Amino acid sequence: MLKQYSLKLPHAVYGGDDAMEQITDILKTNGAKKVAIFTDKGIEKAGLFALPEAAVKASGVDYYVLDELPAEPSYEAVQKLIDEFKRSGADFIVACGGGSVMDAAKLASVLVTDDYGVKELLDTPGMAKKCVPIILIPTTAGTGAEVTPNAIVAVPERELKVGIVNENMIADYVILDARMIKNLPRPIAAATGVDALAHCIECFTGNKANPFSDIYALEGLDLILNNIEKTCDDPEAMEEKNRMQIAAYYGGLAITASGTTAVHALSYPLGGKYHIAHGVSNAILLAPVMRFNSEDPEVKKRLALAYDRCCHGEKNCETVEEKCAWMIRRIEEIVEHLDIPKSLKSFGVPEEDLEGLVQAGMQVQRLLTNNRRLVTEADARALYLEIM
Ligand SMILES: NC(=O)c1ccc[n+]([C@@H]2O[C@H](COP(=O)([O-])OP(=O)(O)OC[C@H]3O[C@@H](n4cnc5c(N)ncnc54)[C@H](O)[C@@H]3O)[C@@H](O)[C@H]2O)c1
Ligand SMILES: [Zn+2]
């Protein structure tokens, strides 16, 4: 039997020089009357808001700025912003920020209703309908949230992060402008870059991998493995940054066509309970989970295929085992080079919390079932213990 697969995409994606200026035409063509611009204080402080703002201004439409959003917000914080958005009466959304801003804006685009809110979508994500068109401009590279149908929010009472998935949240337009990530602080560039790496490698080795996701996951992986360090180390490396931005977008496409696996599943409680940044918790888990997964013959074979595609230096590995070990070593090398913590030690997670973590992680069956190797409770315990 042939596996089913599909890929739902934004209407248009603009990249390269002057991509930002497309906003003006998009707003005019769509007859927008009032634009809500979603962003956050970090973006404003970094001076990044001026570019999209100028493009919106040039269209002559009225606009309203919503910037009161913390990073990795709870569903209540997102709902508060959406309530303000509803009061603004805007009929178009432009969102400029990292995953946190884009996810909040995506939820707003399907929640111009008083019948239900973000809380209700946690249990019944399918009921949301498209209300307002949206342009997404990522400022990290990144979550790939500019292209996925997912929005992730923290749920404090469950000490977990939860992904809401609804294809109505796929953006209408995406702008990829490398200037937005030029001065991204190194720790944020590092963590968000490894998040994109995790998206590509999880999608390529997961149960839901298919011809569409494979294309984007492999190309994304190649771009990331060969550009991430330079991108993070050198503010002037615009070619490399542009490649990372495209790779993050491809990672998002791979998620849209397939899905992430045990790395993201086990990472959700670390974000939900200890507020460890999404990219950092994934980076801590990525090599241990991939080593665990590589016991599965198909995962091993796929990691070897990834080596063939992504290793452009001297190719010293010959066997599948050697190639697979190279890939896992390369992940460790990247995390080490980028100074991302390799364990939970610096986050004050006490060992007595282990059982709680295991129980919370095992709840994320939506992603665990995508993992090619079965993750039992005992496996989750061993993996959390390994990173303690
Ligand atoms: N929807 C999806 O498909 C998807 C996928 C992965 C992750 N996520 C979610 O995305 C969120 C994380 O997003 P993120 O990693 O992009 O970070 P973020 O949006 O949380 O931003 C982190 C910090 O970086 C700052 N920042 C962002 N861009 C900047 C720039 N160019 N210059 C200076 N500062 C900048 C922000 O102001 C913020 O303080 C999490 O909630 C995660 O769960 C969503
Ligand atoms: Zn992610």
Image (cartoon, grey):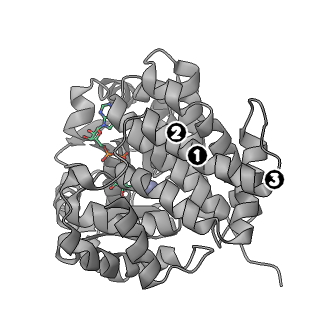
Q: Secondary structure at mark 3?
A: loop
Which numbered mark, 3 or 2, is in the foreground of this view? 3
- Mark 3 and mark 2: span between their CA atoms? 21 Å
The answer to the question of whether label 3 and label 1 lie on touching residues, with beta carbons closer than 8 A, is no
Q: Earlier in the sequence, mark 3 or mark 2?
A: 3
Q: Secondary structure at mark 1?
A: helix
Q: In the image, what residue type sits under mark 2?
A: Glu
Q: Residue furthest top?
A: 236
Q: In the image, what residue type sits under mark 3?
A: Thr
* Residue that appears at 21% across and 66% down: 273
Mark 3 — residue? 319
From the viewer's perspective, tell me whether residue 336 is left or right of residue 36.
right
353 shown above or below 229: below
Q: Secondary structure at mark 2?
A: helix
Locate residue 119, reporting x and y percent.
Answer: 25, 75
Q: Nearer the viewer, residue 230 or 220?
A: 230
| Number of the label disc, if any, that sits on residue 333 | 2
* Residue that appears at 16% across and 46% down: 68
Locate residue 121, reporting x and y percent.
Answer: 33, 76
